Amino acid sequence: MDKWLDNPWFLKALALLLAFLLFLSVSSTDPGKPGDVNVPSDENSETIADVPVKSYYDTENLVVSGVPKTVDITIEGPKNIVQQARALRDFEVFVDLTKEGMGNHQVQLQIKDISEKLEVTIDPSYITVSIQERVTKEYKVNADYNTSMIQDGYIAGTASVEPSNVKITGAKDIIDTISYVKANVTLNDNLSENLTREAGVLVLDKDMNKLNVTVEPETVEVTIPVKPSSKDVPIDIITKGEPPEGVTIESITSNVKEATIMANPDVLKGISKVRVEVDVSNVTEDTEVTLPVIISNGVVSVSPETAKLSIKVEKQEEKKVTNIPITIEGQSEDYEVEFLNPENGRSSVTVTGQAESVESLDESDFKFLIDVSGLEEGEHTVDIQSSAPKDVEWKPSIEQANISITKKEEETQAE
């Protein structure tokens, strides 16, 4: 025996044997390896929620629907292994569709990379999936926004979308139901200028339900042009009141002939002009006034807001023209006509008008006459017919004449 102990090879072999026995002793206490024996451990059960589900299929040519994004699993087994699986989550729940054809299928969810010591329950364990042909089509994107957000007096033009078309990929039967492809833009209230904003693309069916498809790109840039809703209309000058006595308004002119009004299009259609109202009841001489331009209900703004009016007046002068002879027409040679009133057969008028027109008037500018045709002998009251210049106002002192018609004496006739 001493010789063996002195032999280095014997000592090496002995050390190796002891190491191997120690290794077997340690490995027999590892509960995670096959062949574990007599290792006391508490049993435990845990539910792990929201475990992702992975699908295996031909992603280039097929589209699968019906696979849940996540499932819940319940694991039962030794407490330490359950806790380790819950903490690491280094397993995978999946569905293998590589051997399935197109159509609807009921398939079982599976799990891998988890300890064989654990009993696993997947909820749900079976799912119904639809496998269809993968289709990609290009669609035009239309901008969608709330026009009530546009400020009153402004209108939005046709929105532009960049890029104008997107590629949509999905199952063929879903692609066939696409009715609307929209970029929904959220606007701030009272928008009054051009707006450019990114918006997500929505793919909808005819009932406005969102469809489960892939869009490339997912967002687009929408530009909404906003401009004033306006037009030019004439300015109408309206006079109020009557000028003072002896004053005539010759003209009223404005420094602006038109104004630009802003309103919603339906309001603009019904407006053909704006107005300025000027009170002439206190105007006695040439003057200038600045007055507001008055707009109709619904008009948001007007430019200019005021107008300068130049008012030209003419002061009137009154004059009495006398000694105007009254001419007799239709007088018979056998009768004489005598004026009873006015006794001298002359009348007068009161004339009102512009000074330069009135000052030069005399009796020759007026004509008075009476017509005695068919009148018999005796006293008569006849209307005085009169005429005068047109650029003045005038009033005769009398409108009727009293006359006497008598037959001439025979001797006078003989003479």
Image (tube, rainbow, N blue to C red):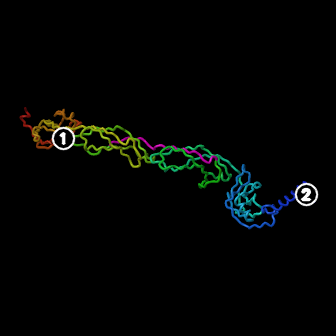
Q: Which residue is mark 1?
A: 395
User: The residue tagged with tag 1: helix, strand or loop?
Assistant: strand
The percent position of residue 385, horizontal first and vertical second, equals: 19, 39
87 in magenta: no
- Count of picture labels: 2
Query: Who comes first in sequence, dot 2 or dot 1?
Result: 2
The percent position of residue 106, horizontal first and vertical second, equals: 73, 60
User: Answer yes or no: do the residues labelled 2 and 1 have beta carbons within 8 Å?
Assistant: no
Q: Which mark is residue 177?
A: none
Tell whether 7 sits left or right of 102.
right
* Magenta range: 216-237
Q: Quadrant of residue 391?
A: top left
Gap between marks 2 and 1 measured at Cα: 167 Å
The percent position of residue 13, horizontal first and vertical second, equals: 89, 56
Q: Which residue is mark 2?
A: 5
Q: Residue at x 17, y 33 (%)?
A: 364
The reply to whether residue 124 is visible in this rendering is no
Tell whether 13 sits left or right of 334.
right
Circle 1 crowding by C-alpha within 10 Å: few under 14, some 14–19, many from 20: some
Q: Amino acid at mark 2?
A: Leu
The one of 237 and 51 positioned closer to us in this rendering: 51
The percent position of residue 52, horizontal first and vertical second, equals: 69, 57
The reply to whether residue 245 is visible in this rendering is yes
